[in-house]
């Protein structure tokens, strides 16, 4: 078990932002966390901090990169295995967001793919990627897919807290997230104990 050092939420934002600022060129950041950890909220605060320094930064949410309902819901609306393996379009995330940012020269990325309400493409306009862009991808189960991120942050929540904080309509997702975390062998660059977002703690090397 790793040792953890407590820090304030603002210090966590600064830690990740500083790691991004230390990198030249476009930087792709995973903010991996279950729904109960609200990874998009943290990603948004990091992006705001980066912009305050003059560094361009944007946030992409994994929930906007869903597979079609015919694949997601083939085994029902509350199947945890489907949530883990058939819910999100990780291939499209790589193709439309991550890979273009690795290419030299001009690049564009897609902010959203599919509307979960209509199950149709949102026909979002591709966005230009300036040379120093930091793009943060927020969502569950990003690690363990071996996606091409330059920096990764994992927000880990204990099972009890995860079950308590996950909305009732998404309770079925908890088992899928836990199983993925048990089998994941991809280590994050920054591991955060996030049972209490107002009192995070970061894993340290002893």
Image (tube, helix red, strand yellow):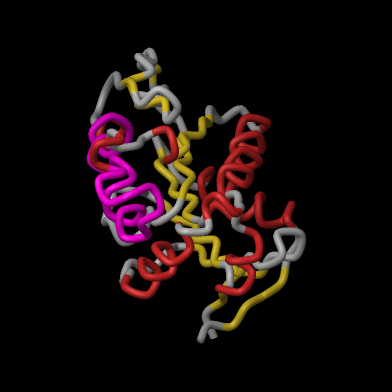
Q: Nearer the viewer, residue 39 or 97?
A: 39
Reply yes or no: does residue 96 show up in magenta.
Answer: yes
Above or below 128: residue 153: below
Between 34 and 102, the one nearer to me in the picture: 34
Horizontal side, residue 7 vs residue 100: left or right: right
- Segment colored magenta: 72-98
Q: Residue 55: percent from the left, percent from the top?
A: 56, 30
User: Which residue in the rendered view is the most extreme toward the front?
Assistant: 76
Relative vertical location of residue 8 with respect to residue 123 in this rendering, above or below: below
Q: Residue 34: horizontal and vertical position, in percent?
A: 51, 56
The structure residue drawn at horizontal position 47% and vertical position 37%, both measured from the top left corner, is 61
Q: Nearer the viewer, residue 193 or 53?
A: 193
**Horizontal relation, residue 20 to residue 8: left or right:** left
Rendered view: 24 above or below 119: below
| Image point (60%, 69%), residue name | 193
Q: How many marks?
A: 0
Q: Looking at the rendering, which quadrant does residue 185 occupy? A: bottom left
Instruction: Identify the residue shown where x is 60% and y is 49%.
Output: 38
The image shows residue 206 at horizontal and vertical percentages of: 54, 86
Confirm whether the magenta stretch covers residue 103: no
Residue pictured at 54% horizontal, 66% vertical: 156
**105, above or below 194, in the image:** above
């Amino acid at each position: 078990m790793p040792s953890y050092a407590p820090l304030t939420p603002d210090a966590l934002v600064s830690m990740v932002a500083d790691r991004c600022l230390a990198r030249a060129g476009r930087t792709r950041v995973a903010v991996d966390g279950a729904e109960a950890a609200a990874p998009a909220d943290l990603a948004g605060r990091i992006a705001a901090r980066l912009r305050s320094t003059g560094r361009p930064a944007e946030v992409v949410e994994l929930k906007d990169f869903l597979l079609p309902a015919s694949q997601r819901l083939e085994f029902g609306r509350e199947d945890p295995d489907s949530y883990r393996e058939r819910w999100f379009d990780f291939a499209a995330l790589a193709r439309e967001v991550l890979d273009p940012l690795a290419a030299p020269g001009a690049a564009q990325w897609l902010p959203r793919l599919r509307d979960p309400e209509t199950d149709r493409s949102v026909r979002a306009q591709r966005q230009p990627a300036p040379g120093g862009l930091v793009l943060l991808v927020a969502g569950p189960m990003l690690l363990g897919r071996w996606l091409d991120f330059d920096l990764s942050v994992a927000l880990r929540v204990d099972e009890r807290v995860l079950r308590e904080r996950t909305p009732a309509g998404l309770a079925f997702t908890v088992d899928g997230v836990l199983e993925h975390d048990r089998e994941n062998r991809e280590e994050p660059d920054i591991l955060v104990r996030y049972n209490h977002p107002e009192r995070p703690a970061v894993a340290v090397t002893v």
